[in-house]
Image (cartoon, coloured by chain):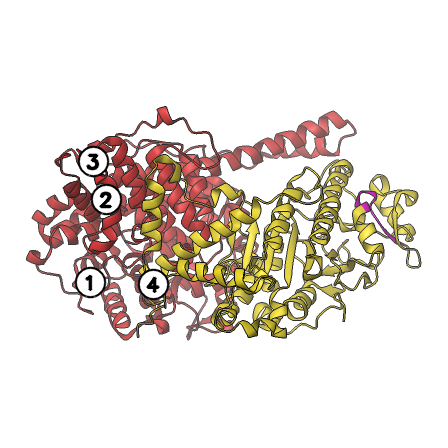
Chain colours: A red, B yellow
Amino acid sequence: MDTSLSPISDDRFGPAEARHLLVRTAFAPDRHRARALVGLGVQGAVAWVLAGGDDSGLPGPPGGPDIRRPFTEEERRAYRQALGSDDPALRERARASRQQIDRDDRQMHKDLQTWWLGRMIKTASPMREFQTLLWHGHFATAYQPVQDAWLLYQQNEMFRRYGLESFATLARGIVRDPAMIKYLNNHQNRKGEPNENLARELMELFTLGEGQYREGDIREGARALTGFTYDDNAFSFNQTRHDDGKKSILGRTGRFDGDDFVEILLRHPACARYIALKLYRHYVADVSDRFGDLSAAQKSVVDQIAKRLRADKYALGPTLGVLLSSRHFYDAEVVGRKIKSPAQLVVGTARSLGTPERSTSRLHENMRMMGQSLFDPPSVAGWGVGRSWINTSTLFARQNTCVYMITGKNPGRRWDRGATNYDPMSLVADLDAAKPAEVSRVLMNDLLGAHVAEDRRAPLEAFLNEGGGPVTGDRLMGFLTLVTAMPEYQLC
Amino acid sequence: MSEKMPYTRREFLQASLALMSTLGTVPGFLSHTSTAMADPAALLDADAVNQGRVLVVIQLSGGNDGLNTVIPAGMPEYYRMRGGLAVAERDVLELDPRVGVGLHPSLRGVQEMYQEGQATVVQGVGYPNPNRSHFASMDVWHAGDTKAADGHRGVGWIGRAMDAEAKRGEHDCLSCVTVGEEAPMATQGVEAKPVSFSRAELFEWSGKGLHPKLARAYEQINAGVEPVTTADPASFVFRTALDAQAASDRVRRAVSRRAETEFPANGLSRQLQAVASMIAAELPTRIYYVALGGFDTHANQAGTHARLLDQFASSVRAFYRELAAIGQDQRVVTMAFSEFGRRVDTNGSNGTDHGAAGPMFLFGPKVRAGLIGPHPSLTDLDNGDLKFRVDFRSVYAAVLDDWLGLDSRVALGSRFRAAPVLEG
């Protein structure tokens, strides 16, 4: 395997390589775009992907910042009085108003999930959304127990805004992020009554990885983070709860606060390597999140990425630019060997097939059945990669979701065949419909990759060609349901 | 490096079905083991009998009010502290008059099973430093780890046991099946994943009916591949696709069976009826997982709780009637739990708030029927909650080690002495 991070030469950067770049960064292949990218050369193409386009026309977030605004003193008093009142109707009203707030908030959480999914499908900056997804799984925060959808939205915007800029900015931001503070109980972390949850995950999952620190570092780190809390939607530092004493963290001593703690972590040599590994897992290969489990070749690449990150003070754009142009990234052992996450599968299918807008909430519901519910990662460790996505039931969910996107047919639901509303012929407008074999070859190259073997293609080509004659929309639709049901379609 | 399989999984299954038909009376649940394939004599191995044992887990989600489930009618404090929510002594179903403990009147089916020697009630089950958040506490029960309340890795006690089986080459894709919308964290391994479905019709490719020729092409693309190495991601997906085909056919065929006996019309019964059908089909499944939600009774608890308990008891009762009718009850142990009990005192809304320890139930002809452990004291409380006496992991240890023959130390991270819930 080629482990070099130097760029491939432009004459090696053909449509297949451009397709690989698009699939790994922008959710979906697009043969017209791929052809255009070839003309830019590899670095031009990567720069184009990184830059993204204009998203100003996309819808803003659902809900609003005030669904869970804190009660005013007056409201609080009235609420308490009502609850303590002898009048059952008054008590009921007070409880009902509280429950309405809970319902509104849960609704915003649901709307937020479909809002983001819709955004991924429509965005002109798909790599930015794909990177946001990486940070969402890295700094994993779920609706429970945060129970404040607006806070999740704010965090998501932070990932979107700085996600391609700098890991240091993100790490500094996350200890001041109300959603994370609430998720990992740091609002309960006060002088003399430590809560170590954030300190522990900050080291173990967010910056250094397991084994790079001791329990004592966690205890001292937790002391540094005391008083880091939130007030309504904003970070707040509570001086009286802060432990201002001396702490020793990872060999450094001082009267550290939470911000100092983050700086110490960022300076630790394990941090860049840990983040490099996360980037590698997101863009290059389904590997373990423990560096020690990697092959020598993979270790060498991750170390090179880490070196770049360190040299660039955690700037992400330049590092990703190097990685995505590299000979390693286009190596035959990398191409087509990564398992798509549910988001990649759903968003990629919508984008590459240009399927009509169907119910985004049903699409998200299907993603949940595949194991990836947005704003609801399964734990603070986020989602796994690769094989963890695939089992016998998720495989059907994945295949059937593609059928739903193409045909409108969702298992267990009534299906209005007439309302299918998808014209797959637009996909092959540039091809000769009278040549099914040609159409089949081009679409399979596009959707599955040129590396798929001839004998694997035969049943699909036979289906498209059945009975001879030119390709029809109806038959092409069946063909696409087959392509998306190929085991190869699960890979990218 | 490359390890060629002799033939595709589909052919393997067909061959095994052919073998089964010649063997006639051999229990189908043995058909999946490769030893059975290679050597029919191995079918008689005593160890293989253990392979046929099944555990069914019933999750009662929301924090079941254990105090109004297993009722200490003999403790005057109960009536003093529970006020309007207390169940009148005359309505309490008798379990053990010597210790003054009985059952909620909706649990008639449980009482009957208890009297037949088919129900165990473990009292005061919990864990140290209980967490009163549904999510955190459920995480603890799912992970089988009390530290899981502060974050976990999405891997559960069953999942770890299944991972270990997979390492020993003893894992079938159907080893763990969950019936319900979501596969609970308890069943997630690092590698081993449960088969889960809410409705059997979701467990097949929905494209089949779109065009007469599609089904055949679909089978060709998913079955015509010989997995080369397990390290290769494409091979892994191919293999899973083959498994999915095989599991889909097996599960849907199994579930389409009609029950021999009557099941009540409710959600838990539908799940358990599907489980009974899969057991009847002798799938190689070791653990089935089902759930009944709605136990989070903060207000006007009495009616809701009674309905839920009735659903629970009548479903389990029907489940074992069915299993007995088809001669499968001897190999099924069922275990029911909730993430916590409720507080001893009622709240101001005729409901109860989140508490700590509660009872667990085990069912089946092979359980050691009776009451395990004394009822928790109503005067010696922990922050107003019942104190636990039995660590839930000791019950897990019993069903893992003593019933399924799986290693509880791997599943739970350390050794717990098995609670005496099974026949010796």
Closer to the chain start, of discs 3 and 2, is 3
Identify the residue under disc 2.
A462
Mark 3–mark 4 distance (CA, rounded to whole Å):
32 Å
Closer to the chain start, of discs 3 and 1, is 1
Have a look at marks 3 and 1 and say if they share a chain.
yes
Is A492 positioned to the left or the right of A372 in the image?
left
Identify the residue under disc 1.
A332
* Classed neighbour count for the residue bearing mark 2: other residues with Cα under 10 Å, few (<14), some (14–19), many (≥20): some
Q: Which residues are the magenta region?
A: B101-108
Amino acid at the residue labelled 4: Pro
Q: Name the chain under label 4.
A: B
* Label 3 SS: helix
* Classed neighbour count for the residue bearing mark 3: other residues with Cα under 10 Å, few (<14), some (14–19), many (≥20): some
Q: Is residue A73 above or below residue B182?
A: above
Say which of marks 2 and 4 sits in front: 2
Q: Name the chain under label 3.
A: A
Have a look at marks 1 and 4 and say if they share a chain.
no
Identify the residue under disc 4.
B227
Give the residue furthest to the front: B22
The answer to whether residue A374 is seen in the rendering is no
Q: Name the chain under label 1.
A: A
Identify the residue under disc 3.
A427
Q: Is residue A201 above or below residue A430?
A: below
